[in-house]
Image: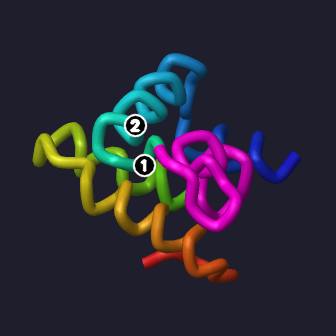
Amino acid sequence: QFLSAVLSRHSASRETLRHLNDQLTIAGAGQWAGGHYVADSAFAFELCLDYLLSNQQAEQYEGDFRGVAYCLVEYFRTGKIGALR
């Protein structure tokens, strides 16, 4: 229910999610960190999904999604709780 609210808020489609998963993998988040496969786990947690969808413009306008991928890898690697920055 929380995840669907995030998806609605960002008007995200399945195609959007597929594209972002591909971009995360290409940018370096296709790895295990803190017991999570980051490129997939980013879609399973409300705060991570919101962060990802809020920052999808980085990939679209700057052509570089590595900062977003790095932030997510570190989030899971360190076991952080709460909002991503």
Please tell me in which quadrant of the rendered image residue 12 appears. Answer: top right
Q: Nearer the viewer, residue 54 or 33?
A: 33
| Disc 2 crowd, CA 10 A, few/some/many (<14, 14-19, 20+) | some
Q: Which range of residues does the magenta coloring cover?
A: 31-49
Label 1 is placed on what type of residue? Answer: Ala
Residue 21: percent from the left, percent from the top?
A: 48, 33
Task: Determine the residue located farthest toward the right in the rendered image.
Answer: 1
Mark 1, other Cα within 10 Å: few <14 / some 14–19 / many ≥20: many
- Residue 5: x and y in percent read 74, 47
Position of residue 46 in the picture relative to residue 30 (left or right): right
Q: Residue at x 37, y 55 (%)?
A: 69
Q: Give yes or no for residue 19 being in the magenta stretch.
A: no
Query: Residue 25: which numbered mark, if any?
Result: 2
Task: Give the structural element (helix, strand or loop) at label 1.
Answer: helix
Task: Please give the label number shown on residue 29.
Answer: 1
Residue pictured at 76% horizontal, 47% vertical: 3
- Marks 2 and 1 close (CB-CB < 8 Å): yes
